[in-house]
């Protein structure tokens, strides 16, 4: 497994690069969202909420798309995209990526509405902020499991 | 052992991404507060140390790589450049200087992208 991991065909490199780049953007942006939304609960809510919302919209969602497209590309290169019984780590990858997109979209909508209400000086954005924060935190934990599966490749 | 080292090495690399994304937001004009920058800087401290130590450990652990392979030395060089630029950005922001901060950040981002390219393509391995 170690040797297989170290040596791979050259034409796998670009899809793997895109997959990892997308995943790093996704996770990096998610942590920024968590910190921003958590800060919004304590202090400067309008600016922090806006940063959290924009990070979701401009970092997390595009990162997810690049990560997922890269995953599909390299899975097809490795012949796993139409395999009847793919390895467990491939299954974990699909299970952790696709449902979390729904959570991320829901979090983006919650954070967007909360940011707008906060900017307009309205009330009632605290619950939406908390909902977005919880959704993003759950997603982040799921992605740590995905990183573990992608690096250790359990069978 | 290899799996654990690789997992922790990757996790450390993802922490570097947290720093880059946060400072990208700052470079693009986002009003990041002190707490946000504090978290980003700690992520670089932990992620930087983790990528370097675990990366060298992996290079020594795996028989098919040598510490003096060009791509490993290149990666260490880029790591030093990225860390130096990051320190300069941090110091300048703490002193209230904003000149060249964005340029330094983008150069650090390029250095980390270069690191990722070396880790994936491993030229000469």
Image (cartoon, helix red, strand yellow):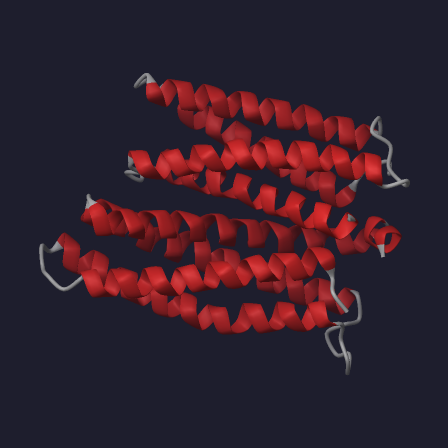
x, y (%) of residue B52? 66, 32
Splitting the image into 4 quarters, where does residue A136 fall?
bottom left
x, y (%) of residue B125? 86, 38
Decide if residue B100 is in sight here. Answer: no
Q: In which quarter of the image is the C terminus of chain A?
A: bottom right
Which residue is located at x 60 percent, y 49 percent? A21
Q: In this view, does B65 lie to the left or right of A134?
A: right
Q: In this view, does A51 lie to the left or right of A22?
A: left
Which residue is located at x 29 percent, y 37 percent? B33
As rendered, which of B113 and B10 lies closer to the eye? B10
Residue that extends furthest to the bottom in the rendered view of this protein: A84
Which residue is located at x 36 percent, y 70 percent? A106
x, y (%) of residue A118? 16, 55
Q: Is residue B50 left or right of residue B94?
A: right
Q: In this view, does A33 lie above or below B63?
A: below
Decide if residue A138 is in sight here. Answer: yes
Q: Quadrant of the N terminus of chain A?
A: bottom right
The number of callouts visible is 0
Splitting the image into 4 quarters, where does residue B30 fall?
top left
As rendered, which of A5 and A145 lies closer to the eye? A145
x, y (%) of residue A139? 46, 63
Q: In this view, does A84 lie above or below B55?
A: below
Splitting the image into 4 quarters, where does residue A84 fall?
bottom right
């Amino acid at each position: 497994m170690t040797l297989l991991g170290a040596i791979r065909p050259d034409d796998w490199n670009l899809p793997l690069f895109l997959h990892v780049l997308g995943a790093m953007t996704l996770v990096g942006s998610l942590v920024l969202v968590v910190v921003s939304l958590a800060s919004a609960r304590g202090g400067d809510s309008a600016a922090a909420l806006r940063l959290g919302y924009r990070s979701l919209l401009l970092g997390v969602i595009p990162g997810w798309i690049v990560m997922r497209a890269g995953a599909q590309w390299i899975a097809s290169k490795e012949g796993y995209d139409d395999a009847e019984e793919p390895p467990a780590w491939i299954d974990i990858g699909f299970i952790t990526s696709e449902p979390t997109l729904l959570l991320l979209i829901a979090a983006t909508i919650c954070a967007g509405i909360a940011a707008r209400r906060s900017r307009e000086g309205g009330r009632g954005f605290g619950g939406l902020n908390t909902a977005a924060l919880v959704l993003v935190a759950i997603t982040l934990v799921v992605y740590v499991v995905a990183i573990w599966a992608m690096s250790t490749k359990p069978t | 052992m290899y799996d654990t080292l690789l997992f922790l090495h990757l996790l450390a690399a993802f922490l570097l991404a947290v720093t880059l994304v946060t400072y990208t937001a700052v470079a693009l004009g986002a009003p990041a507060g002190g707490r946000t920058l504090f978290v980003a800087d700690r992520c670089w401290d932990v992620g930087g140390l983790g990528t370097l130590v675990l990366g060298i450990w992996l290079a020594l652990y795996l028989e098919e790589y040598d510490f003096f392979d060009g791509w490993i030395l290149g990666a260490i060089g880029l790591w030093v450049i990225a860390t130096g630029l990051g320190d300069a950005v941090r110091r300048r922001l703490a002193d209230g200087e904003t000149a060249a901060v964005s340029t330094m950040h983008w150069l650090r981002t390029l250095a980390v992208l270069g690191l990722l390219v070396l880790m994936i393509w491993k030229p000469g391995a």
